Image (tube, coloured by chain):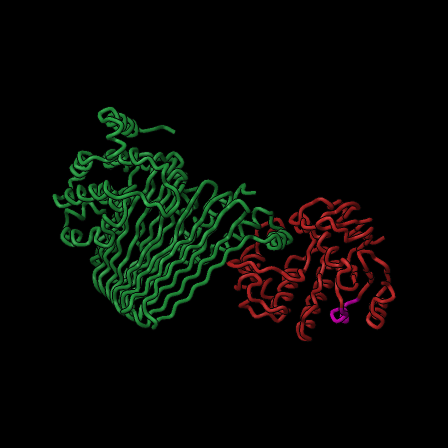
Chain colours: A green, B red
Amino acid sequence: MAETTKVTDIDRSIYDIRNAEDNDYRMRSGLTPEIVEKLSAEKNDPEWMLEFRLKSLEVYNKLDIPDWGPPIDELDMDNISTYVRPKSDMKASWEDVPEDIKDTFERLGIPQAERKSLAGVGAQYDSELVYHNVRDEVSKQGVVYTDLESALRGPFAELIRKKFMHLVPPNDHKFAALHGAVWSGGSFVYVPEGVHLDIPLQSYFRLNAKGAGQFEHTLIIVEDNAYLHFIEGCSAPKYNVANLHAGCVELYVGKNSTLRYSTIENWSKNMYNLNTKRAVVEEGGRVEWVSGSFGSHTSYLYPMTILKGKGSSMEFTGITFAGNGQDLDTGAKVVHNAPDTSSVINTRSISKDGGISTYRSSVVINPQAKGAKASVSCESLMLDSISRSDTIPAMDIRTGECDVGHEARIGRISDDQVFYLMSRGMSEEDARATIVSGFAENVSKELPLEYAVEMNNLIRLEMHGSM
Amino acid sequence: MSETVLSVEKLNVSINEKHILHDVDITVNRGEVHVLMGPNGAGKSTLGNVIVGNPAYSVDSGKIVFGNEEITNISADKRARSGMFMSFQNPPEIGGVSLSSFLRTAVEQRRGQKVKLWDFKKELKAAMELLEMDESYAQRDLNVGFSGGEKKKSEILQMLLLKPTLAVLDETDSGLDVDAVRLVSKGIKEYVEKCGGSLLIITHSTRILESINVDYTHVMVNGRIVKTGGASLVTEINENGFADYE
């Protein structure tokens, strides 16, 4: 693969920083205020954002790496901070989406329309031309869909200042702090009151060696009585040298509005995916999460919903597929803070070739949430005896006036099922893939067609040669 | 000379080192209906499973020839593609896979080519009507939440669409009510008449045999075929049981 000069630049800057600092200092601090200042200047941040970044950096340096999940000690924090600087450099190079990336999408079966919105991802970093089609159509309704950087300098600057990292404050955890210090790229979406957006907004995050979008920030504000479906696709090509994704998603759902947020993540298998997603839902509002986690070396991912308004609701549908060398810790969190709120969490996890898949959830029902309903259902499928599957559901119920259900199941593909399908002419590999796709069907049926196709292709790719 | 479809020769089979079938011989010609009877645990289902290639069993000696090909060590999917079928005694549930999409895949495997959705739907509808199955079953997950009778009808439905040259029916009539027996028998008759296929019917009872012309009856006891006769043997066993052979 031909590397661009940009990559050479990155390599040199990594080299330069190492030379300029002494090892101990680098190891301790990882990321310096100087680097953050430089990044901020390059991004032409407003003053408050620079301050925000520097404060986040302080928090980051104070907090410890979480010790309750999959091991992340191989994560070289020193290296990660150095990724930050060149990341903003690469803005200009996004215009030319490389041939091999296009080929990859072809292989993944993403149709023409989807490729167009992939190209749209580039718009988040600099020009807006790639999203132009979408924007023309939706802007008539007053909908704003743009990259966060330009939104910070536009008419929504004050609103963003109020909402940015308000749901996920930098002191939430170490990687939220890191995100606050070095975030770059991502989307800003604003849906005005009463607007029902029929077509989904899509962004596809394709990470390459230059590491764009590693710390992307997605901020979505849906005003009252509105509807939005936002689709996020994430994948990384094999040549990716980036090793940390610490994005952040903040969703504000207004009264009687619905926001559907679908994600298919397929990071390369050297990725530490420490992503934070959170939504707050006002009275009568609803958030629907659809989440597929396939790639990455290690994941910590638990989209959280705060049901703030009376009668608000959430539904989380997720699937996780952990293969060889992968340790994926995923699930969902919900906090019921108001009466008559309801939540449904429905997950599937698959582990194979020694992969570890952990389901972790937290349901909190606070005393004021009288009449709340919560239901949790998680099913795991282990494809062989060397793989692992764990279920860690936590519930904290503080009122008697609520209805809570929980169901967990762990299983294996039975020889009977495989033989049955084979006795109808399917090869053993197809039989297994069919069973796994069927197991994942509750998620794929929730996805838009092209993503459902991509997900089934991913399952087939993962299953291929698994015997 | 009639054409031999299946020939089982001196077959010895074990599972988990337990010897189950002893020197079993069976020959089935084109269009013939064979009935395999015997007490519980005699090894009837084992024979059916071994014929269609269930890898849980090991063939210790002897051979199975299907058409002109020895298939003793060939995998179940290849046997199915070349025209073997078994109606399972307890078909497993496959969640998230609809009966319709599964069956279309199976039909394509069997015919070795893509089948147009429209054509497939027409065939499926006709077969479901014959078996008086509600159309909604096509969209339900394969065998999930099906009653005993529905499962058996779904198996016969698959047989009708796959048009095998040899179908093994493993206890297809067990646990069925009168109405379901009638419909399953109707499906089997349709298969015999329209496809000219051969049948090996494993059963305890004789209810589904009433409307089908039986050519041969085999009695299996303790893993051995102890007697082979014509259709009248069914009636005899029906009256006297297996005591004479044990």
Horizontal and vertical percent for residue A171?
23, 48
* A390 up-or-down from A376: above or below: above
Q: Magenta segment: does it hold A467?
A: no
Q: Quadrant of residue A181?
A: top left
> Is A105 in front, or is B244?
B244
Q: Is residue A431 left or right of residue A198?
A: right
> Is A449 in front, or is A446?
A446
> Is A60 in front, or is A288?
A60
For image coordinates 79% across by 49% down, the residue present is: B12
Q: Quadrant of the N terminus of chain A?
A: top left
Residue B223 visible, this orientation = yes
For image coordinates 42% across by 42% down, the residue present is: A106
Residue A136 visible, this orientation = no
* A381 up-or-down from A343: above or below: above
For image coordinates 21% across by 63% down, the residue present is: A193
Seen as rendered, the residue at the extreme bottom is B178
For image coordinates 47% across by 44% down, the residue present is: A355
Q: Quadrant of residue B148?
A: bottom right
Q: Is residue A133 left or right of residue B118?
A: left
Horizontal and vertical percent for residue B114?
57, 51
Q: Quadrant of the C terminus of chain A?
A: top right
* A175 up-or-down from B91: above or below: above
The prevailing secondary structure element of the residues shown in magenta is loop
What are the residue bounds of the magenta stretch?
Answer: B205-213
Q: Is residue A54 left or right of residue A15?
A: left
* B163 up-or-down from A296: above or below: below
> Is A44 in front, or is A357?
A357
Horizontal and vertical percent for residue B25?
82, 52
